Image: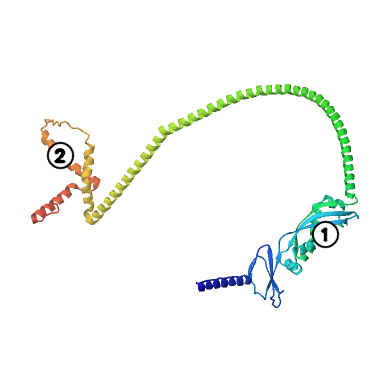
């Protein structure tokens, strides 16, 4: 049991020693402090390094850590009997806030001057510097400028002290002027003079205002009377103008009424003319629909029928031409008998034409009268038929140049010869 306790104590001591050692090696810097670690230096370096917030490592025994506060330091600045411009002694009380600068370059100045120094020392140096600057600024300003424009005075003081503060490594955050007094009552005298001047100016202004008020009142009354006269005159003029205007308006109204009547008649005539135009247009459309359009359609239909009939005639003519062409080819192939064949083919048509000439003659009956001179009526009539036929054939021969009977006789002889020889003719 004692061994366990001894081991536990040893472990705790070892852990504590390790923690202490680690704490000795690590430097942790809060935001409102600056850690200056010195002790090691390399060629070309300043011999110290600065840590602003964060942590770093250091070598114990070889490096030393010093701390500088960055907190604000309040300073009461006061000067007594400091001569201003014009040799007037003034006493000024002000309050300012300074701090160790953390800006690069300026912090090095603060380290060289205030490292290891207490805050009271920094406060003392800053106060003496600001009081000296305050005396220098007062020498360039009149008491009136110092007392009346304290913001400008404070800004001038800040501009004057800024270079000195930067040289010391400090930042001047705020500087406000609290009070400005003098022991010779210069400012009181200036105040009383200003007060008397203001009172005098106020009395003069009051008298001027009263005079101006009286003059304004009199002018107002005069203007009121003149305005009343002008108003009455204007009333009369307006009344006259009103009557004239009423007469003009009455005449204008009558003219407008007449113009309206004329315009109405004109509009009526225009409307009737427009209506008549519409009626004419409607009649045109009816004529177009009832007469022109059907006539045009009929014309187009007749044109189409005529074109159709013409096309039919053309096609029929072309067919007849083709028939005639083929007949000509057949006739040309027949040789010398072609003319007779052609006439024989036309013979039925010719006979038909001859028959057509007497087709309209209606013979109800034929009466043969015996003349009694020894002639016989019917035999004589029958004997005349061959002569009529022969006369008909002669007329045909005269018209065509072909003897039908001779042609028939030749054809008959051919037929008989064909029958006698026992050959079949073309018509068998």
In front of the other: label 2 or label 1? 1
Q: Is residue 112 visible?
A: yes
* Image quarter of residue 74: bottom right
Rendered location of residue 31, percent (x, y): 66, 63
The kind of secondary structure element at disc 1 is: helix
184 and 10: which one is in front?
10
The kind of secondary structure element at disc 2 is: helix
Q: Residue at x 23, y 50 (%)?
A: 342
**Which residue has dot 2 on it?**
385
Disc 1 residue crowd, few under 14, some 14–19, many 20+, Cα 10 Å: many
Q: Residue at x 15, y 41 (%)?
A: 386
**Which residue has dot 1 on it?**
131
Please say if 386 is above or below 425.
above
Q: Which mark is residue 173?
A: none
Q: Residue at x 36, y 39 (%)?
A: 301
The colour scheme is: rainbow
Mark 2 or mark 1: which comes first in sequence?
Answer: 1
Rendered location of residue 343, percent (x, y): 22, 48
Q: Is residue 339 left or right of residue 370?
A: right
Distance between the Cα atoms at labels 2 and 1? Answer: 183 Å
Please say if 306 is above or below 254.
below
Rendered location of residue 418, percent (x, y): 11, 54
């Amino acid at each position: 049991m004692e061994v366990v306790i001894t081991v536990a104590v040893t472990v705790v001591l070892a852990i504590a020693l390790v923690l202490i050692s680690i704490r000795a090696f690590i430097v942790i810097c809060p935001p409102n402090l600056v850690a200056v670690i010195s002790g090691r230096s390399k060629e070309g370096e300043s011999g110290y390094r600065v840590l602003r917030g964060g942590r770093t490592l250091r070598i114990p025994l070889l490096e030393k850590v010093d701390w500088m506060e960055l907190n604000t330091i309040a300073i009461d600045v006061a000067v007594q009997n400091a001569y201003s411009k014009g040799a007037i002694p003034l006493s000024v009380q002000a309050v300012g806030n300074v701090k160790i600068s953390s800006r690069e370059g300026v912090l090095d100045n603060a380290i060289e001057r205030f490292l290891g120094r207490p805050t009271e020392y920094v406060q003392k140096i800053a106060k003496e510097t600001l009081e000296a600057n305050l005396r220098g600024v007062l020498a360039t300003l009149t008491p009136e400028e110092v007392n009346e424009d304290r913001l400008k005075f404070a800004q001038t003081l800040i501009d004057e002290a800024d270079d000195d503060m930067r040289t010391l490594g400090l930042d001047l955050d705020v500087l406000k002027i609290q009070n400005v007094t003098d022991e010779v009552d210069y400012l009181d005298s200036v105040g009383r003079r200003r007060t008397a001047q203001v009172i005098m100016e106020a009395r003069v202004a009051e008298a001027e205002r009263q005079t101006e008020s009286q003059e304004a009142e009199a002018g107002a009354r005069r203007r009121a009377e003149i305005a009343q006269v002008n108003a009455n005159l204007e009333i009369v003029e307006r009344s006259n103008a009103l009557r004239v205007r009423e007469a003009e308006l009455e005449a204008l109204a009558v003219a407008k009424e007449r113009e309206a009547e004329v315009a109405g008649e004109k509009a009526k005539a225009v409307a009737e003319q427009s209506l008549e135009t519409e009626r004419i247009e409607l009649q045109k459309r009816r004529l177009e629909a009832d007469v022109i359009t059907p006539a045009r359609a009929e014309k187009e239909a007749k044109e189409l029928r005529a074109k159709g009939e013409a096309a039919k005639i053309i096609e029929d003519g072309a067919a007849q031409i083709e028939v005639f062409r083929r007949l000509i080819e057949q006739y040309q192939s027949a040789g010398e008998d072609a003319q007779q064949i052609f006439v024989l083919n036309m013979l039925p048509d010719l006979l038909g034409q001859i028959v057509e000439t007497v087709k309209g003659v209606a013979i109800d009956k034929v009466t043969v009268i015996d003349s009694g001179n020894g002639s016989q009526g019917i035999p004589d009539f029958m004997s005349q038929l061959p002569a009529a036929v022969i006369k008909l054939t002669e007329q045909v021969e005269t018209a065509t140049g072909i003897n039908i009977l001779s042609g028939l006789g030749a054809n008959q002889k051919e037929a008989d010869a064909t029958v006698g020889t026992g050959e079949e003719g073309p018509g068998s």
